[in-house]
Image (cartoon, rainbow, N blue to C red):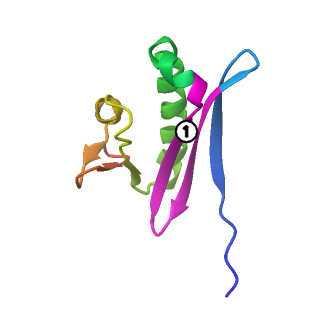
Amino acid sequence: GKSLPVTIFGIAGVDGDRVLGMGAIYAEDGNMVITCRIAEDARADLRRHARAILRAARALLAQATKTRLPVRCVADRRYPRAVELLEHLGFRRIDKDLFEWTTST
């Protein structure tokens, strides 16, 4: 069959002309899925951009609030503080590396 179009809300983190990373949120199977990719050359400098990362994450969650669907994501083990960030944003662990955020959080 024909796939239905998917609406994705995305945000990019930039420092001047340099793209640091991007995040996106989209609906899939009754959940909102949030994803993030950090540019390879920006990974060593994440602490310097912590506020921008938090602002971008909160902007994505603000969009999710409008849908009233739970948001799910997988903590990336390449980043030792990924779990700490997710918990700071209000996500709760529902499986080994799977986290969920709800509007009631």
Q: Which residue is mark 1?
A: 37
Residue 91 within the segment the image draws in magenta: no
29 is higher (above) or lower (below) than 24: below
Q: Is residue 40 left or right of residue 74?
A: right
Q: Position of residue 6 (x, y in %)?
A: 65, 63
Q: Is residue 55 left or right of residue 5?
A: left
Residue 30 within the segment the image draws in magenta: yes
Q: Position of residue 61 (x, y in %)?
A: 48, 40
Total labels drawn: 1
Q: Which residues are magenta?
A: 20-41
Give the camera-side residue of 19 and 91. Answer: 19
Residue 19 occupies quadrant: top right
Q: Residue furthest right?
A: 17
- Amino acid type at circle 1 is Arg
Q: Residue at x 66, y 58 (%)?
A: 7
Tell me the element at label 1. strand
Give the camera-side residue of 94 and 78. Answer: 78
Q: Residue at x 56, y 55 (%)?
A: 26
10 is higher (above) or lower (below) than 4: above
79 is higher (above) or lower (below) than 27: above
Q: In the rendered view of the protein, which quadrant contains the C terminus?
A: top left
Residue 5 occupies quadrant: bottom right
Q: Residue at x 54, y 20 (%)?
A: 52
91 is higher (above) or lower (below) than 40: below
Q: Residue at x 31, y 49 (%)?
A: 99
Mark 1 Cα-neighbour bin, 10 Å: few <14, some 14–19, many ≥20:
few
Residue 77 occupies quadrant: top left
Q: Is residue 40 left or right of residue 87?
A: right
Q: Residue furthest top?
A: 48
Q: In the rendered view of the protein, which quadrant contains the N terminus?
A: bottom right
Q: Position of residue 60 (x, y in %)?
A: 53, 39
